[in-house]
Amino acid sequence: MEENNSSNQPPQYGQPQNQNLNQPINNQFGQIPVPNSAAVLVLGILSIVFCICYGIIGLVLGIVAIVLAGKANALYKANPNSYTQASYNNVKAGKICAIIGTCLSSLYFIILIIYVAILGAALTAMPWDQMMRH
Amino acid sequence: MVDWLEHHLLTCFIKSHFGVECPGCGSQRALISLLKGNLVESLQYHAALIPLICTIVLLILQLILKRNNGGKYVMWAFILTCSITFIQFTVKQIMLFS
């Protein structure tokens, strides 16, 4: 469905107009928000909320948000004039949030794994047999 | 409401299984003390709770109002929340071991 959007230009535009992205945009050209722009922002922010506890959910949400942002970015680049600037800014912000959330969750997970590995090694290396005999 | 929350605290999966605190441990206690009105106690438990609430409010506002540059504000609020969370987490861990 998303591929349809990028390939079929809405007929009222005709040829792409000038590529100036800073023009005032108030939906007067029938522009629509980039698909999934809100979802990217929400998932990007939820990735840290859930990274805070139950880290793996944050990791998954962050990766999903990055993938969606990549798709939305490609759609916008293919046809910048038919999408609103605000939604594209949302996608950019959401992508950065998602990247930060994913990085922090994975960093925390790596630290946790190292910690548990060290703890496990220390516990197995302890001379339990001798300690039990005494 | 506060009473009900106090008796229905979710236990952190990581803390109960590995014995290590996660960066979000303390947020529920912080929320309860915030609801009771103890701002200082709330900040001690989890300093990033108030910025987190602000971020979520900003996010909802942005989704409703669809401002042109609103996404940027949400992003900076998010970065602030993250940095506060992880600075406090690091400080807590260092205090625990020293």
Image (spheres, coloured by chain):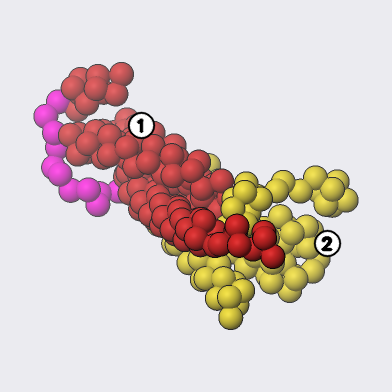
Tell me which corner region of the image, top left, top right, bottom left or bottom right, holds residue B25.
bottom right
Q: Nearer the viewer, residue A81 or B79?
A: B79
Q: Position of residue A26 (x, y in %)?
A: 36, 41
Image point (71%, 55%), residue name: B28
Is A24 displayed left or right of B29 in the figure? left
Q: CA distance from mark 1 to mark 2?
A: 42 Å
Q: Nearer the viewer, mark 1 or mark 2?
A: 2
Q: Main secondary structure of the magenta part?
A: loop
Indicate which disc residue B16 carries: none
User: Which chain shows up in yellow?
Assistant: B
Q: Which span of residues is magenta-colored?
A: A14-26
Chain of the residue under label 2 = B
Chain A on-screen colour: red
Tell me which corner region of the image, top left, top right, bottom left or bottom right, holds residue B91.
bottom right
Q: Position of residue B27 (x, y in %)?
A: 67, 58
* Vertical position of residue A13 compared to residue A96: above or below: above
| Farthest residue, direction bottom | B98
- Can residue A92 be spotted in the picture? yes
Image point (41%, 55%), residue name: A110
SS of the residue under disc 1: loop
Q: Which residue is mark 1?
A: A35
Q: Nearer the viewer, residue A120 or A107?
A: A120
* Vertical position of residue A29 compared to residue A92: above or below: above
